[in-house]
Amino acid sequence: MAMMRYLLLAALLVFLGCKKDPDFGPQQDNPEIRDSLLAPVYSALVLNEGNFTYNNASLTLVDLDQRSDQQDFFFRSNQVKLGDVAQSITVRDTMAWIVVNYSGLIYQVSLPEVKIVKTLNGFVSPRYLLPVSDTIAWVSDLGAEKIYQLNLRTGEVSTRTVIEGWIEEMIVVGDRVFACMVKSHEVIVLNKHSGQVEKRISVGNQPQSLVQDYQGKVWVLCDGGWNVNTRKNPRLDRIDVDRLQVDFTYTFPNIEDSPTRLRTDGAAQQLYFLNRGIYRIDVTNNTPSPELWLETPGRNLYGLGVSPDGKTILATDAGSFTAKGSILHIDSSANLLKTYPAGFIPQHVAFYRSN
């Protein structure tokens, strides 16, 4: 009997002494950990323009997470040279279109391998490709002075709209396309379904790039022109997309300024552009004004890109234009994280999700 009581007492002590370790087993959901695992990870494709007639355009891949680079990535993936004067690259989901200006062609490639899916010909000197639907894209062409229509599924190219003039960047806003008309100093507004011109909006001299902000308004950066006899002070114009008219203008005080590459962050509340250094504008202000965001002494900045999450800014340095350039990896607090090598005249930057 005594032995039985002893065994019962020992069992009771063991039971009472057992206590679940609070750090063992399934834990409560941690939002910070969950969000970090689900957050998108981006890589960047940097298009090296190359020297005119030298056929030395190339593509640099930058892994933003690993902070690593791979040079000549297009050639390494396809064993084909990219061509002569690479102008722009457009990314949509797992596809990208690389526009090679002087070669007169566009490569459709798969991501992330950058393998050629189609080679699209029939252009004179294409500049920018803009998807206007799931199946149709528009291509601006400097030499042909027209906008081509490209069927993204079949690769068929046809003439869409004949435009007399030099067209640079284009964006879709609802059922309309807004396009920069460089020589006529206008933004032309076209119906994206019919291609018909709805309005021509006068802006500053030589509009080159444009973006849409968080309120839906379109900002247009005009470099002022290069001809010393006809140039004017650069301007940044804002267009009300409902009334189709300029409702705000910032005029740069120095005619020697030459702002380029207008870009926006993911929230479309901060605009960035190049003007020797990198400038930023908070467009949530009632009277937005550019502020120098990052000085870059000794650099020849030529291209600019902002990741969709707004955490990464890549600026390209073309150097002397005759030697290979470099890529500056900058965070959203203007800290230079790393500098990568690049090809000749690194220019256009495009981001794609790599996770």
Image (spheres, rainbow, N blue to C red):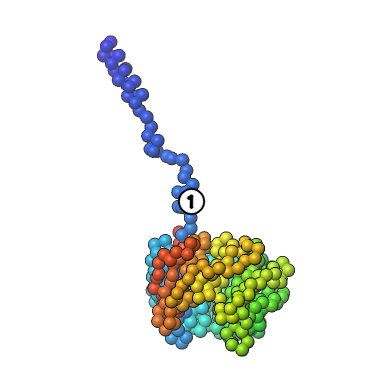
Quadrant in which residue 48 is drawn? bottom left
Q: Amino acid at mark 1?
A: Asp
Residue at point 65%, 70% (across, down): 238
The residue lying toward the viewer, choosing from 283 and 1, is: 283
At x 38% / y 66%, what residue is drawn? 68
- Estimate how packed mark 1 is, as few (under 14), some (14 to 19) or many (20 or more) residues with alpha carbons within 10 Å: few
Q: Residue at x 49, y 62 (%)?
A: 332
Q: Image check: 201 left or right of 56?
A: right
User: Element at badge 1?
Assistant: helix
* Quadrant of the image occupied by residue 153: bottom right
Single out the residue that lies furthest toward the bottom.
229
Is 282 rendered above or below residue 323?
A: above
Say which residue appears at 69% left-offset and 77% top-offset.
202
The residue tagged 1 is 35
Q: Nearer the viewer, residue 190 or 260?
A: 260
Residue 171 percent location from the top left of the image: 61, 71
Whole-percent x, y for residue 64 in the image: 43, 64
Q: Is residue 13 left or right of residue 99?
A: left
- Residue 95 appears in the rendering: no
The x, y position of residue 9, in whole percent, is 31, 17
Q: Residue furthest top?
A: 1
Q: Is 335 above or below relative to 168?
A: above
